[in-house]
Image (spheres, grey):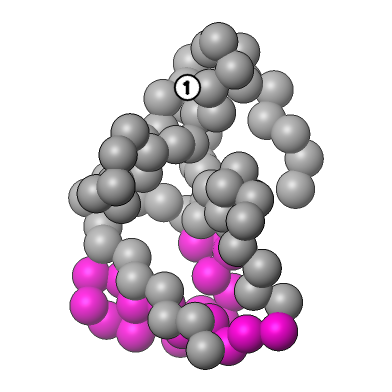
């Protein structure tokens, strides 16, 4: 993924966490859709290339098949099962 041009707030990415609760915060001056893939790219330490990834959103399995393109929505709970 490309670097996000709005990464100017003292080096903080617009997608980030504040603690270990798992809540993803979007803090940006640009109003646009952000994806789960962008967040995972920022984390940079999750290699899923040789893994099966199943995603559930608000407890319901997502049959979309491409979790990286999932647009993040306020208040949703996303669970990734990596095998």
Residue 64: x %, y % from top left? 51, 80
Q: In the drawing, does residue 28 fall left or right of residue 79?
A: right
Q: Quadrant of residue 52?
A: bottom right
Q: In the drawing, does residue 17 fall left or right of residue 12?
A: left
Q: Is residue 21 above or below residue 29?
A: below
The residue sitting at 29% across, 47% down in the picture is 20
Residue 34 visible to the viewer: yes
Residue 54: x %, y % from top left? 46, 84
Q: Is residue 12 above or below residue 32?
A: above
Residue 74: x %, y % from top left? 28, 46
Q: Is residue 3 above or below residue 27?
A: below
Q: Secondary structure at mark 1?
A: loop
Residue 38 visible to the viewer: no
Number of on-image labels: 1
Q: In the drawing, does residue 45 fall left or right of residue 59?
A: right
Q: Is residue 27 above or below residue 59?
A: above
Residue 57 falls within the magenta-colored stretch:
yes
Q: Quadrant of residue 18?
A: top left
The residue sitting at 55% across, 28% down in the picture is 13
Residue 4: x %, y % from top left? 68, 30
The residue sitting at 38% across, 38% down in the picture is 17
| Structural crowding at the residue carrying mark 1, measured as other residues with C-alpha within 10 Å and reported as few (<14), some (14–19) or many (≥20) | some
The residue sitting at 40% across, 33% down in the picture is 26
Q: Which residues are magenta?
A: 50-70
Residue 19 falls within the magenta-colored stretch:
no
Q: Which residue is denoted by mark 1 in the rendering?
A: 28
Q: In the drawing, does residue 53 fall left or right of residue 81?
A: right
């Amino acid at each position: 993924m490309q670097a996000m041009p709005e990464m100017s707030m003292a080096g903080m990415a617009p997608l980030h966490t504040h603690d270990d609760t798992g809540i993803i915060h979007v803090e940006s001056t640009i109003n646009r859709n952000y994806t789960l893939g962008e967040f995972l790219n920022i984390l940079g330490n999750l290699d899923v290339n040789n893994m099966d990834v199943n995603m559930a959103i608000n407890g319901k399995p997502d049959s979309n098949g491409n979790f990286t393109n999932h647009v993040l929505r306020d208040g949703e709970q996303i669970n990734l099962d990596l095998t």
